[in-house]
């Protein structure tokens, strides 16, 4: 069965790929410097999400002492 964490990791990786592909496509078509800055921000944001998903601590059950 697919776990939530695994789904989040694959989803964030897909987000990076899609953002990069869209930025590359529109860059090939021609963009202004402001559009370049927006594309860079979008790609960096998606990479940030992917890294955060992978380094976020796994929830642990609280033990009663």
Image (cartoon, grey):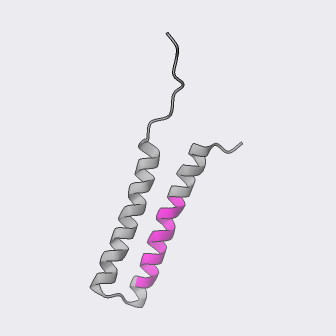
The magenta span reads 13-26
For the stretch drawn in magenta, what is the main secondary structure? helix
Asked whether residue 19 is drawn in magenta, I would say yes
The quarter of the rendered structure image containing the N terminus is top right
Q: Residue 61 appears in which quarter of the rendering?
A: top right
Q: Position of residue 35 (x, y in %)?
A: 34, 82
Q: Position of residue 20 (x, y in %)?
A: 44, 70
Asked whether residue 62 is drawn in magenta, I would say no
Question: Does 54 sit above or below residue 44?
Answer: above
Outermost front residue: 64
Q: Position of residue 52 (x, y in %)?
A: 41, 48
Q: Residue at x 42, y 89 (%)?
A: 29
Q: Residue at x 53, y 50 (%)?
A: 9
Q: Position of residue 55 (x, y in %)?
A: 42, 42
Outermost left residue: 33
Q: Residue at x 43, y 41 (%)?
A: 56
Outermost top residue: 65
Image-based side of 29 in relation to 34, left or right? right
Is residue 63 or residue 46 the one in the foreground?
63
Q: Residue at x 45, y 54 (%)?
A: 50
Give the total number of marks visible in the rendering: 0
Image-based side of 10 in relation to 38, left or right? right
Question: Does 15 sit above or below residue 25?
Answer: above
């Amino acid at each position: 069965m697919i776990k939530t964490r695994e789904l989040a990791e694959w989803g964030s990786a897909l987000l990076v790929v899609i953002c990069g592909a869209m930025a590359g496509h529109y860059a090939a078509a021609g963009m202004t410097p402001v559009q370049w800055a927006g594309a860079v921000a979008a790609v960096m944001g998606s990479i940030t999400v992917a890294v955060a998903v992978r380094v976020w601590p796994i929830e642990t059950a609280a033990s009663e002492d």
